[in-house]
Image: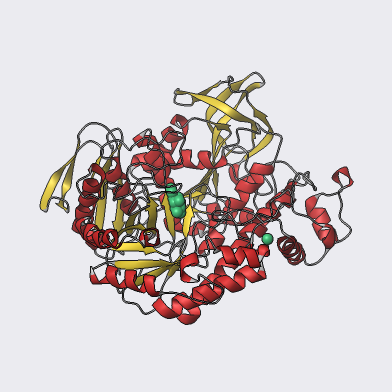
Amino acid sequence: MKDYINKSFPHLIYGADYNPEQWADYPDILEQDMELMKAAHVNEMSVGIFSWAFLEPKEGEYDFSFTDEILDKIYENGGRVILATPSGSRPRWLVEKYPEVMRVTADGKRLGFRDRHNHCYTSPEYRKKVAAIDYKLAERYGNHPAVIAWHISNEYGGRCYCPYCRRAFVEFLRKRYDNDIHKLNEQYWSAFWGLKYDNFEQIEPPTDMSVSAINALYVDWERFVTEQTADFMQNEINAVKSACPNLPVTTNLMWKHHLNYWKIAEKLDFVSWDSYPEWKDPFENASQVAFWHDLFRSLKFRPFLLMESAPGLVNWMAINRLKRPNIDKLQSMQAIAHGSDSVQYFQFRKGRGGKEKFHGAIVDHAGSSDTRIFKIVKEVGETINKIDEIAGTGVKSKVAILFDWENSWAIQYATGFNNGNKKYTETCENYYRAFWKEGVNVDIINSEGNFSKYSIIVAPMLYSLSEKTIDKIEKYVKNGGWIYSTYMSGYVNENDLCYLGGFPSGVLKTVFGIVNEEIDSLYETDEYIVKTVDDKSFKGRDYCEHVIIKGAKTLATIQTEFGNYPALTVNEYGKGKAFYQSFRDSGEFNEYFLRKIVIERRIYKEFDNLPDKLTVHTREDDKTVYVFIENYSEKEQCLISDRKYFDLLNGKIITEIVVKPLSVAVLRRDK
Ligand code: GLA
Ligand code: ZN
């Protein structure tokens, strides 16, 4: 069964952010846009993201004439629209009349009217005004044949410290700690420096001017910011759904973001994200982007949309290089390989002025279809047409990386390690790369995920975890799961309160068959030798725990000034196995062992022994498997198979697959 973003448009989506209001005085340009849209094979435009000032020029006075015209025009020319709610930036009159809609900074300053993405997400007035414009839009366009989905706001993020947010934070804590201040004091360990609270009303968000020595307060503040943002978004979703219940909703997410996206995704019909990697080193960057594609796919385990990507360059990096030849197409195909049902760009046409006038776009200031980028976009469009049948297919994985946002906050605010070099996210990406290189599909889950689906779960640096998660891990391994964990795991509960009785916490000592006595944070210049039992040699850096064996078997040893310690252990527990890596490696070590583990665990791979810098990913439905062979090297690569594949890009049956430098082959086979 295919799972489409919107059943009425069962296709891959190929589109861009489109800001026609910037060109309202240029009717010729707007006409040309339609011709260029068709010429580029673009079938979708994301419209209205920053349109509020035009849609509601005066309070309560709406003007939809321009949007009517644009939506009709796009539809008449064969395009579809993902229509935005405009809350990412607001009209001037709104801020002049209701200054409370703007954010207050941590040092107590209220922002005036400025730019975008700086509203308070608690302000009742802002919520009311946003709901009103959202409802009007939904009422007017909910049944417009062009509109296939809602793009709720734009890149939610940031924190507000206004009186409304402070009050809501206190209420959030009251609820979380059952209105029991003793319970909060106990979890916050607030006897430390005599910081204890007498009542909830005394609690302030952590800033430079308030309590900052309680780590759990930071973690709760981040939890609150996510919850409040999700609630603000829900207010928008309710408004559009009340007028138009059937159109699916999404919002555009970003990588390495501070919000806990699992909580945001719960409220969405499908996930979308904006991908802007540097592409300095195609192979390295591709593995990092792949982690995020898989994470966004795993947020709902269904196709997602690549909502924005840059054709050519962006305008906000320190050095805005053009992407090397072939990379534009490669990044687009990679997204689809990992489960995206779209390739979308920011932006369709470059503005004449303003901050983003030199940001990459399909249509340059030259206004022509005869540019290098336009031709690339057109070629990608043609390719997408050839593989359209992939829309709605899914990804199956037997391996998961556990990446947990709450854990990332806890690590971020904890001190006592190499405080500038904790790199939780990078460490998860690092372990992911081992599977990515092997051509193994991977899901990314958090502590609340369904562990039992997976044959292997890699849970790096799981510093903060609840007793419930400890219990889940124990059951998972007992029932036959294989877990691979690392240094800095099982230290604190969900409120950053250390577990007593030795790390890793509680029964995990028995599951892993080890105890970690202490952790050493190394200087940048420190390097340890790691020797495996089969006499291979690797390097250790950054972190090294002094692990004591309590039943596990040692697979590698790390040589330190304090003596030799287990570097990697494995313990048989129940029907499963638990691996523990006590130090940080740069990738070679975990790749060496995870490769062996993949083989031992018989994880399915479409191809064995992939050549260097070539990887494979699959999507499938009930009957068919689609195979993406991605070549990130500068040379042509070839795979030979016993199976016959249909080559979708060249329209023929093949057994020998030749993939050009920095390009992708897309194949189909029956199941
Ligand atoms: C973000 C925004 C867009 C645009 C691009 C530029 O993703 O959503 O409006 O500013 O960045 O890269
Ligand atoms: Zn606020």
Q: For residue 635, what is the image quadrant?
A: top left
x, y (%) of residue 545?
64, 31
Kindly identify the residue that appears in the image at 34 percent across and 77 percent down.
144
Residue shown at 33%/53% (left/top)? 349
Number of marks drawn: 0
In screen coordinates, is 466 left or right of 558? right
Residue found 79% across the figure and 46% down from its top:
209
Where is residue 219? Give x, y as percent. 68, 51
Q: Residue furthest front?
A: 25
**As drawn, 525 above or below 505:** above
**Taking the image as drawn, is residue 597 in sight?**
no
658 above or below 1? above
| 359, 176: nearer the viewer | 359
Question: In what quadrant of the picture does the C terminus appear?
Answer: bottom left
Image location of residue 32, percent across then percent down? 24, 59
* Colour basis: secondary structure
Is residue 58 shown left or right of residue 435?
right
Q: Nearer the viewer, residue 251 or 260?
A: 251
The picture quadrant where one finds residue 488 is: top right
Horizontal side of 453 relative to 104 (left or right) equals: left
**At which x and y percent is residue 198?**
89, 58
Task: Report the quarter where the N terminus lies.
Answer: bottom left
Does any portion of residue 646 appear in the rendered image?
yes
- State the residue in front, 270 or 318: 318
Ligand 2 sits in quadrant: bottom right
Q: Is residue 209 above or below residue 138?
A: above
